[in-house]
Image (cartoon, grey):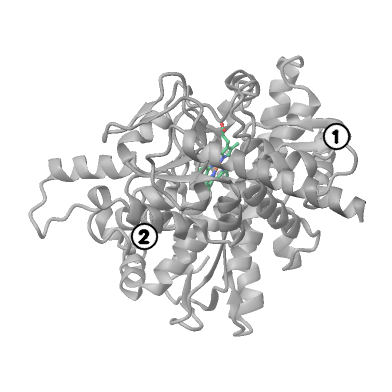
Amino acid sequence: MLLLLVALQSLGGLLLLAIIQLSWTYFTTPLKSIPGPFFAKFTNLWRFFDTYGGRPELTHQLLHKKHGSAVRLGPNVVSISDPKYLRVIYNTRGDYLKLKKTDPWKSKFYTVNDTKVGNQIIKNVFSTLSNEWHSTALRPIQKFYKMSAVLAQEPLVDLTIHSFFKHLDEKFVDTGKACKIDEWMLFFSWDVIAQMTFRRPMGFMDEGRDHSGLLHTADRALDYFATIGQIPALDHWLAKNPIRPIGPPSFDSAAVFCAQQVMERKQSESNPSRQPDMLDGFLETQKVNPEAVTDNDLISALIVNIVAGADTTASLLRSVIYYVLKNPKVHKRLQEELDNANLATPVPYATATTLVYFDAVIRESGRIGPGVGLLLERIVPQGGLALSDGKLIPAGTIVGMNPWVIHQDKEVYGEDAASFNPDRWLRDVASGETEEDFQARFSRMKATDLTFGAGNRICLGKNVALMQVYKAITTLFLTYDMSLVDPKKEWHVQNSWFVRQSDIDIKIQRRKVTKA
Ligand code: HEM
């Protein structure tokens, strides 16, 4: 009985302490005047559950509609939607850090993405919070992501497109079966990035399924990253638990695969007539400067290529296909442009970029359905962030923009910002828009585009992704007639930082006009 009383008293004490702490947070915070959901002002549990629900980008859109351009999503977290601040928060100086390790402010969202091998925490170019570490890691490999270097691998993309179409023909065109194009775009994107990286696909298209379980692992890892990233302190007790890690399945198999590729390549005879891939480039750099590029650095760079570059590209590919098939007029106009352009197949990247309407379709798909769907979190530096309404967001606050929110800005994208309309990326001759006005509007839209992030931490693989997408989509729409099995059905979307779309079943036939 006495024991029970003591337990109840202790529980009561703890509860009281928690209430005092929450009230203290609520009443003393300098962010009191920033509106937002009531519970978000006390605890990050609000955003944890919102993200767990799978569609946080929709909540963020609604909250900004209701409260304006600054919304509080956590006791120390503010979401910003005013495009004016995009170049302030995501600048090239990098003073709005993902967070310095020594900072007391505890964002650590990105560190959830670190991996733990034994007792060692392994960071990567994406997850690191330090600008110094970031520059050191990037310096030796950055040149391989420039468009000139990426173009040298175009034949490897062609090879993967040929293989993709062979599978589409055999499995769906010849049999008349419906194709789950959402899955096939994922198989394609993992195989194509592996081709460019190691001159070897991961085998998803050949198997026609997630034969290694890697795709499932990637999904679970992202679910974990997105949700636990809202209360990053939990990561220490879960995946990074010092005694027994409790978390998503690890990327061990991907790490082993990458390590094998490095070892095999080092042991194989060099063959100058072979199509070079990214690993060749990385190894060459290591030869010149072995201190700057260790084997571990190599493996880490290879893993990042696969992990950051496959799901994201699949997301954009699916967006384009879904929106085009949902909009028959857009589909028709796109096919007309492709048919009239006298294109070779697979379509060369340099030619694809000259197709004006196609380019508008890609930009619009990335705008309306960006592949990343949470705040790109940064920390306000010394001096704070002054908002135009006079409020000051103090140093140490976590701020960020969600591409799904900022891409809906009506002042930049027009009153119909919520709809899919590739025409917004073209000059509106019918209503008398001058070339000069169009260029100004176009530049503003581009400057507000956060599809690939911005500033010093902008997407490293943007050129890689664009080459894959421009080539695959032009060649796909040129070669096949595709339609949704049920044109009224909506796709399913799961936002786990990367946005995963599913339930896109299509019918597919070869078009008469072309032969691949
Ligand atoms: C359509 C495809 C892609 C999209 C939409 C996309 C989107 C993004 C975004 C929004 C960021 C910024 C994240 C932040 O600021 O928090 C980012 C960073 C990054 N992306 Fe991509 N990405 C794509 C493809 C790729 C590819 C193909 C690769 C690699 C080959 C890649 C590698 C990276 C890396 C390494 C970073 C971290 C850069 C840094 O912090 O310096 N991405 N990506």
Q: Nearer the viewer, residue 374 or 360?
A: 374
Q: Closer to the N terminus: mark 1 or mark 2? A: 1
Kindly report the distance in space between the C-alpha atoms of the residues bearing marks 1 and 2. 44 Å
Q: Position of residue 378 (x, y in %)?
A: 51, 33
Which circle marks residue 263 in the picture? Answer: 1
Residue at 51%, 83% (x, y): give it: 485
Q: Position of residue 241 (x, y in %)?
A: 83, 40
Residue kind at label 1, given as amino acid type: Met
Residue 362 in view (yes/no):
no
- The correct choice, above or below, for 62 with respect to 226 in the image is below
The quadrant where ligand 1 appears is top right
Residue at 30%, 68% (x, y): give it: 333
Helix, strand or loop for disc 2 = loop
Q: Position of residue 480 (x, y in %)?
A: 48, 72
Q: Quadrant of residue 504?
A: bottom right
Q: Nearer the viewer, residue 28 or 244?
A: 28
- The correct choice, above or below, for 487 with respect to 352 in the image is below
Farthest residue in the left direction? 432
Count residues near mark 1 (Cα–Cα under 10 Å), then give few for <14, some for 14-19, many for 20+: few
* Residue placed under numbered mark 2 in the picture: 342
Residue kind at label 2, given as amino acid type: Asn
